[in-house]
Image (spheres, rainbow, N blue to C red):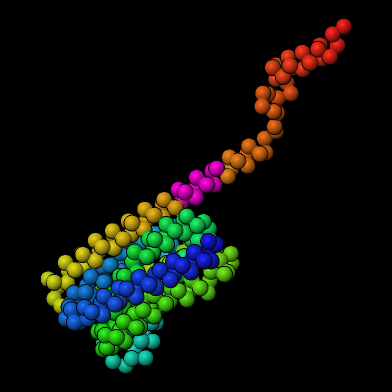
Amino acid sequence: MDSVTLTLVFALLAAGLVLVTLCGLRFAAAYTRAHSPLLAAFSAGLLLTIAVLHLIPESLAGSDIALWMVAAGLGLGIVLRSLSGRIAPDRVKAAAMAPVFAIALHAGFDGLTYTIAFASDSFSGLAAGAGLLLHKPADAAVCFILLQRAGLSDSRAALWSFLAAGVSTLVFAGVTAPFAGALSPALVAGLLGLAAGVLIHVSAAHLLVHARTGGLRRAVPMVVLGIVAATGLTAAHRAGHDHGHHHEHVQDTHSHDAASLEAMPHFGPVGGPTSGRNASADARVVLASHPGD
């Protein structure tokens, strides 16, 4: 399969994984509503850790303006909060909608990442794609919990969560895949920094505030649990990412060696024109041709 097809296949897998997660959450809707503050605490630890351990390092590695993009993301989080307040005058609904917008933005950038990864090398794309799939259920769960808190019915919360966490990835991947050659890795790295800033703002200004309503004694262990879960997801993603880079490096080395061999002058299977063995063989041929000399 070509890079465009692989990008779309993984984007569809991401959307499908989000859908399966939301179907499970829909059946457990009563539980998620009853334990909303604790789940918000878990989500805060999860998103903060993903931003700090995954998104920011990826951005720093690929962009010279990564820190500026993180700062811009923090500012964008404030803008999203303001826009949410205008769309939903109710304070609780506005506080819940801003993080959903942020996660939709982050999920869209996942689609961009699929495009860049598969355009560079199919094996690296498979490794990076598998790593990105790991945190899709977390994105879906956070959106569902927040939209429940905003007062949406369980069915509508599931629908909008699917649009935010699943469809956004599919749309970004579908739109950008045909133009992968025009997208630079530095651009995507900068956008990851932007997403990191937004998620940090969302976690600190929204999720942790909501988590405190359930009591600090209960919230703190859930935050720690979210940190542990995100650390494991990040480690799994990084392992696949590093393996993909190693494979790409080996391929580049083999290509370089092959090119070097082709560029070298070819002197035959025994030796060059000045080889002693070749000279002796030539002398024997000459003597055999002139036996009377």
Q: Could you say which is closer to the camera, residue 80 or residue 162?
A: 162
Looking at the image, which residue is at 41% across and 50% down?
243
The residue shown at (18%, 79%) is 31
Question: Considering only vertical position in the picture, is 278 above or below 226?
Answer: above
In the shown orientation, is residue 60 left or right of residue 284? left
The residue at 54%/43% (across/down) is 253
**Which image quadrant for residue 265?**
top right
Query: Which part of the image, by quadrant, shows the C terminus?
Result: top right
- Residue 257, how many percent across, how many down? 58, 40
* Left or right of 133 on screen, residue 122: right
Q: So how many labels did they put on this image?
A: 0
Q: Is residue 41 above or below residue 252?
A: below
Residue at the spot x=26%, y=75% of the render?
Answer: 24
Report whether residue 125 is seen. Answer: yes
Magenta stretch in the rendered image? 245-254
Q: Main secondary structure of the magenta part?
A: helix
Question: Which is nearer the eye, 87 or 60?
Answer: 87
Q: Residue furthest right?
A: 292
210 or 39: nearer the viewer: 39
Q: Is residue 246 magenta?
A: yes
Residue 101 image point, x, y percent: 37, 80
Residue 103, horizontal then vertical, whole percent: 36, 75
Which image quarter: residue 53? Answer: bottom left
* Residue 202 picture quarter: bottom left
Q: Is residue 67 left or right of residue 269?
A: left
Q: Which residue sits furthest left? A: 217
**Residue 143: x, y in percent?**
31, 78
Is residue 98 visible to the viewer in this orientation of the structure? Answer: no
Q: Residue furthest top?
A: 292
